[in-house]
Amino acid sequence: MGACVEPRYTVFVAGGIASGKSTVARLLEQQGALRIDLDELSREVLAPGSPCLEEVADAFGSDLLDEDGSLDRALLAERAFETPEEARRLEAIEMPYIKALLGDRLTVVSCSSSLPSLVAVEVPLLDRVEDMLPLADEVLAVTAPLALRRERAAGRGLSEEDFEARLANQPTDEYLRSKATAVIENDGTMSDLRRRVDWWLATREEAARG
């Protein structure tokens, strides 16, 4: 393999529950970006037989594992989100594995012979990966009014109790804005959001052309 180079542009797309960060990341993917979802990496590090899964089972109960060694994710979520302390305990186990896998993925992209013009990393908990911000050229925060986020979450079948529990475990919009180089307000229609994403992308492409 030849010498590795950096991807042209890596953006961390951050936002809280039901803010629309996943939608923004997918819209960028539709425009040709490589999308990396940290939630998906979380599932990967918890694959049957993995060291991370073994640690999780030791901490939260061996009955989390099905007969084939796979994880009962619903039961883990129930236990991990029971209290903020339990959620932090799970994160303390998972995050080192997730960060290592993200670093590997970005290295693979950097060393690929066919680089994407943009790498969009979907980040649900920006404060937990703050030490990895040097890997990003930009942080794009996606925000939305809290009442609208509650409505969206309810539409997905998430109870008010679950929404509040997850919200309490996430960084605030004020924190996201303090770390962001750009903010997309997702307070309108899907067409509004698409236009805002297109505008953000166009400004970056224009800057890249110099």
Image (cartoon, rainbow, N blue to C red):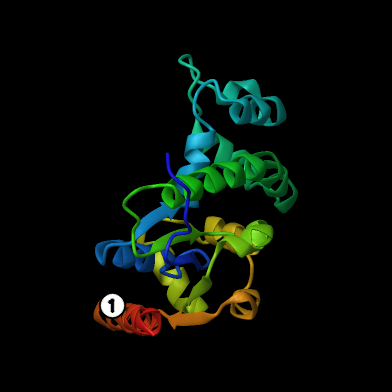
Q: Quadrant of residue 204?
A: bottom left
- The reply to whether residue 90 is visible in this rendering is yes
Give the answer, above or below, for where 128 lies relative to 179: above
Q: Is residue 183 left or right of residue 94?
A: left
- Residue shown at 33%/62% (left/top)? 33
Task: State the residue position of label 1.
Answer: 194
Give the farthest residue toward the right.
85
Q: Is residue 142 left or right of residue 61?
A: left
Tell me which amino acid carries mark 1. Arg
Q: Secondary structure at mark 1?
A: helix
Give the farthest residue toward the front.
2
Give how far across and how far down residue 191 sits, in percent.
Answer: 24, 80
Give the answer, above or below, for where 194 lies relative to 80: below
Q: Quadrant of the N terminus?
A: top left
Label 1 crowd (10 A; few <14 / some 14-19 / many >=20): some
Give the answer, above or below, for where 126 lies relative to 69: below
Q: Is residue 39 left or right of residue 97?
A: left
Q: Nearer the viewer, residue 118 or 140?
A: 118
Give how far across and how far down residue 19 sits, in percent.
Answer: 45, 70
- The reply to whether residue 170 is visible in this rendering is no
Q: Quadrant of the C terminus?
A: bottom left
- Residue shown at 43%/76% (left/top)? 148
- Residue shown at 56%/47% (left/top)? 103
- Residue shown at 61%/39% (left/top)? 97
Give how far across and how far down residue 137 sits, in percent.
Answer: 53, 70
Give how far across and how far down residue 134 sits, in percent.
Answer: 62, 64
Q: Quadrant of residue 184?
A: bottom left
Q: Is residue 188 left or right of residue 170?
A: left
Q: Nearer the viewer, residue 151 or 30?
A: 30
Q: Nearer the viewer, residue 83 or 176?
A: 176
The number of callouts visible is 1
Give the farthest residue toward the top.
67
